[in-house]
Image (cartoon, rainbow, N blue to C red):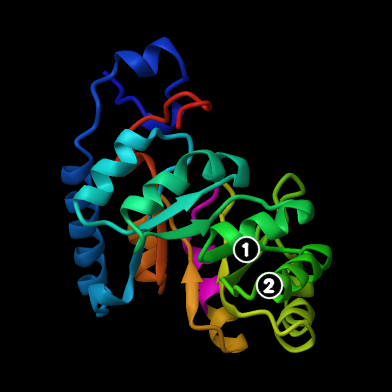
């Protein structure tokens, strides 16, 4: 029998019928896999930051990860983060939140208030909005520039040909705290060439952080130099209802 991909499980009754994941055990397994991949690549496991992507998961699963000692989390949407994270951060003030989904310019101020890292900076209008919001709020979350290496029109991200000038705008003209690059390779392509290219671009631009790799390919990303991997279903299991908090 074919194994069910948890990312493809539909929401609703089917997801509800599946057993709750053992989040702590899953975290241990993912960390062990990251460590093994790092050692195979001649790297220290301490170089890789595991971002547990908790989008569309309820607070119970997030609390399980927090109780297991994990502190780095990724969310896709400002509104969902506002609805579920404030009480969690009251209990766990050292939690670090990464925005890993696309950000509308009119939500820039909310994102600056909520997140510690914004991984999806990808256009001048958003860069200007973030710069204004950071100046007003006196808070400066790290920013990664998302790069659309597959030239996919349905995805966000800066085109490779525009990357150098966009980095200059963000880092030099607007003084944004740009510290890394992020990518999501095309779903049906072998990810290795994209990971290798993103790491090369980050090195060329003097950016120390490289966010790449998700549940299906994070070990490959580690081999090619990822400093952040974004793992959701391998930790939290199938996503719950979009309205769950």
Q: Is residue 15 left or right of residue 173?
A: left
Q: Is residue 63 left or right of residue 80?
A: left
Residue 95 visible in image: yes
Judged from the image, the secondary structure of the residue bearing numbered disc 2 is helix
Image coordinates of residue 143 in percent, x first then y, are 60, 71
Crowd class of label 2 (few under 14; some 14 to 19; many from 20; radius 10 Å): some
Residue depicted at 64% across the width and 75% down the height: 138
Vertical relation: 109 (above or below) 223: above
Name the residue tied to disc 1. Answer: 112
Residue depicted at 26% across the width and 75% down the height: 46
The C terminus sits in image quarter? top left
Judged from the image, the secondary structure of the residue bearing numbered disc 1 is helix
Of labels 2 and 1, earlier in sequence is 1
From the image, give the main secondary structure of the stretch colored magenta: helix
Residue depicted at 26% across the width and 47% down the height: 65
Q: Are marks 2 and 1 in contact (CB under 8 Å)?
A: yes
Depth check: give the residue in front, 106 or 88: 88
Q: Is residue 66 magenta?
A: no
Depth check: give the residue in front, 78 or 86: 86
Depth check: give the residue in front, 226 or 173: 173
Q: Which residues are magenta?
A: 189-199
Vertical relation: 2 (above or below) 34: above
Crowd class of label 1 (few under 14; some 14 to 19; many from 20; radius 10 Å): many
Name the residue tied to disc 2. Answer: 134
Residue 216 visible in image: no
Q: Is residue 193 magenta?
A: yes
Image coordinates of residue 92 in percent, x first then y, are 32, 55
The quadrant in which residue 72 appears is bottom left
The quadrant in which residue 38 appears is bottom left
Residue depicted at 52% across the width and 26% down the height: 243
């Amino acid at each position: 029998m074919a194994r069910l991909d948890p990312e493809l499980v539909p929401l609703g009754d089917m997801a509800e019928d599946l057993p709750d994941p053992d989040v702590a055990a899953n975290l241990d397994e993912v960390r062990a896999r990251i460590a093994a991949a790092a050692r195979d690549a001649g790297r220290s496991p301490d170089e890789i930051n595991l971002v547990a992507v908790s989008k569309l998961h309820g607070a119970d699963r997030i609390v399980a990860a927090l109780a297991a000692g994990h502190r780095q989390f990724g969310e896709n949407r400002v509104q969902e983060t506002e609805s579920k994270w404030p009480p969690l951060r009251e209990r766990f003030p050292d939690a670090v939140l990464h925005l890993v989904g696309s950000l509308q310019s009119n939500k820039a101020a909310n994102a600056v208030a909520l997140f510690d890292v914004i991984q999806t900076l990808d256009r001048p209008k958003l860069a200007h909005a973030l710069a204004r919001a950071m100046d007003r709020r006196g808070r400066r979350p790290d920013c990664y520039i998302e790069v659309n290496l597959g030239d996919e029109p349905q995805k966000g991200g800066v085109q490779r040909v525009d990357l150098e000038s966009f980095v200059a705008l963000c880092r030099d003209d607007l003084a944004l705290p740009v510290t890394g690059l992020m990518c999501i390779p095309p779903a049906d392509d072998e990810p290795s060439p994209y990971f290798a290219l993103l790491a090369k671009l980050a090195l060329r631009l003097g950016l120390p952080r490289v966010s790449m790799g998700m549940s299906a390919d994070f070990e490959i990303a580690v081999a090619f130099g990822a400093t952040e991997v974004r793992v959701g279903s391998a930790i939290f299991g199938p996503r719950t209802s979009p309205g769950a908090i």
